[in-house]
Amino acid sequence: MMYQYQLLDGWTEAFFISAKKIFNQSPHRFFYQDPDWMQLDPHPKRLLAVTDPTGSLLAYAAVEIKSLRTLQLAFGPVLINQEELPQIIAGMARWLKKNGWWRFTVQLPVPDRDGGREAVEKTGRLISFRQSARLFNWKSWWLALDHEPAQLMKSFSHHHQKSVRQGLKHQISYLEATTDEQALQLAQLYIEMYRHRKLPVNDDDARKLFIAVGRYIQLFKKGIMLQAVMDGRTVGGIVIIFQGNTAYYYLGVTTISYKRSIPILYTAFYHVMELCRQARISTLDFGGIAIAGRKGVSLHNINRFKMGFGGEEVNYPEQLVFDLNPVLSRCIETAVLWRNRLRQWKVRQ
């Protein structure tokens, strides 16, 4: 089949309806690519559309345009027939090169075990690309929700079991946040948490993000925004997005006031597991784990928190990097890596 490609600033009503049908039938869904979310995203993405010669939409991807003619595609493209994935990606890369782009990166939405590795091999037979462990490559941690939370807790680490029991002793109410006001309360904790860790945060962006996610969950019934309240104060919360039969952990916040004394998030996850089961969700995806997490470093601690609930590691193919302009693409990559190292050094200081 002949594929045609377009880079759009927005989409027509007909494209939107077609994209929703494709997304709902896609075997691997990430909410970043959900047309419903793309309507509310405070940082709108451009749309890379794939059509047949008659103009009918076959696949699409929300893409992020970086400076210096760089385009990033995360967890896409979205399509129904996974067998077409290699041809469509190869076609995207060729079309972008023809139109003067310098660099194109793709994080596939398909785990290795579900055909991701085979998709990479087939794509490699059609077009050249490279992969690198130095880049941000996705892997995650999944927990099968095949038992009641009380039964699942037996697979938690000893520390996690103890923390959940300790949290349940406190008078904490776990409520589903359904209003913009509740979303803003969680956003404020997010801002305070980042400042406490001396991490960069934009207050307005954080507030817009929490409001948008809250509205997405309420309008389309695609997740849970859980608010932890104690003594009339919001002390924590987590945001879970439903992706088909999988629940994706997107955000978690907790007050710095009780950071050490009350394990708020441990108990929040315990409650979320029950809510997910009630929604007929079969798997909890802990929203990625860091590949490089040395002991004593914050990334290591985040990994340990997620893994402590039991479950298994799920690997995805490393990013596909298409050096559409080989010299300039590698210069951009080197500059980004050095920038990231500088940021990490500043945080450690």
Image: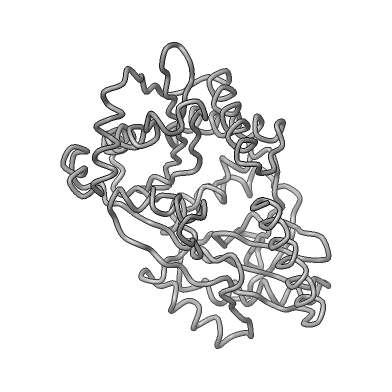
Residue occupying the point 77% across, 75% down? 329
> How far from the left and from the top, in percent, is residue 67?
82, 60
- In front of the other: 75 or 58: 75
- The extreme bottom residue here reads 125
Describe the colour scheme in one phrase. one colour
Classify the position of the N terminus by image quarter: bottom right
Q: Is residue 266 above or below residue 81?
A: above
Picture quadrant of residue 191:
top right
In-image side of 161 versus 120 (left or right): left
- In front of the other: 39 or 198: 198
- The extreme front residue here reads 349
Q: Is residue 244 above or below residue 334?
A: above
Residue occupying the point 60% across, 41% down? 197
> How far from the left and from the top, in percent, is residue 156?
24, 47
- In front of the other: 338 or 41: 338
Q: How many marks?
A: 0
In-image side of 140 versus 310 (left or right): right
Picture quadrant of residue 56:
bottom right
> How far from the left and from the top, in percent, is residue 265?
39, 35
Q: Is residue 178 above or below residue 113?
A: above
> How far from the left and from the top, in percent, is residue 138?
51, 63
Residue occupying the point 44% across, 37% down? 222
Residue occupying the point 47% across, 36% down? 239
